[in-house]
Image (spheres, helix red, strand yellow):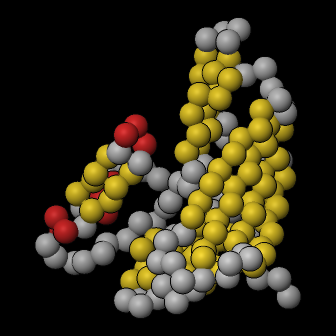
Amino acid sequence: MVLPVVHLQNAHLCITISRASGAILQVENRKSEVKLVQAEEHGLPPWRLFLFDLSTGAVQEWQGWEEFTIMTSPLISGGEQANLLWQLGQGLEMEATVKLPATSPNALLRVEVRNDSPMTIQQVEFPVLRGIGRLVESPAENNLLLHPVAGGLLFVDPVDTFARWPV
């Protein structure tokens, strides 16, 4: 029986990835048993892709995919990796790798977009994480989230800050 999720694990982390969409559904710190991310499968892309059409000057966000595959394999140096591939259609495909080295407290993520369409890639974000959890209950200002977009943004108490925004 094939599980609906893939688990990458080492002594530090357990990362759960959806077989349906490639979304990272859970990231658990195994030593503290804190779930850093815990989300349900929504069928939404785990990425954001914005394309610029030179002929019209319009920017559009790509909304879905035609086919998705995920494969796991061991790392030569120890640990595990998941290779994710989304066939988007119209000459676009996105490939991502999630690596979890055997002794590392950090996961390594990489994304690549192959573009054979007439549009220009303006922006790509991966992963889009839903269900970001609270690290500590109080004080709230000790909950920090660093987002590496546009040179970096630091959010204080992201759970309450983002609660006002729809997912």
Residue farthest along the front direction in this orientation = 77
Left/right of residue 101 with respect to residue 138 in the rendered view: right
Quarter holding residue 83: bottom right
Residue 141, position as x, y percentages in the image: 16, 64
Placement of 122 over or under 29, stated as above or below: above
Name the residue at 32% across, 46% down: 153
Quarter holding residue 5: bottom right
Quarter holding residue 132: bottom left
Name the residue at 43% across, 43% down: 149
Left/right of residue 163 with respect to residue 115 in the rendered view: left
Placement of 138 over or under 127, stated as above or below: below
Residue 5 visible somewhere in the drawing: no
Name the residue at 84% across, 33% down: 91
Placement of 26 over or under 83, stated as above or below: below
Residue 51, position as x, y percentages in the image: 64, 27
Residue farthest along the top direction in this orientation = 55
The quadrant of the picture occupied by the N terminus is: bottom right
Name the residue at 32% across, 59% down: 145
Residue 35, position as x, y percentages in the image: 43, 79
Of the pair 76 and 131, the residue shown nearer to us: 76
Residue 92 visible somewhere in the drawing: yes
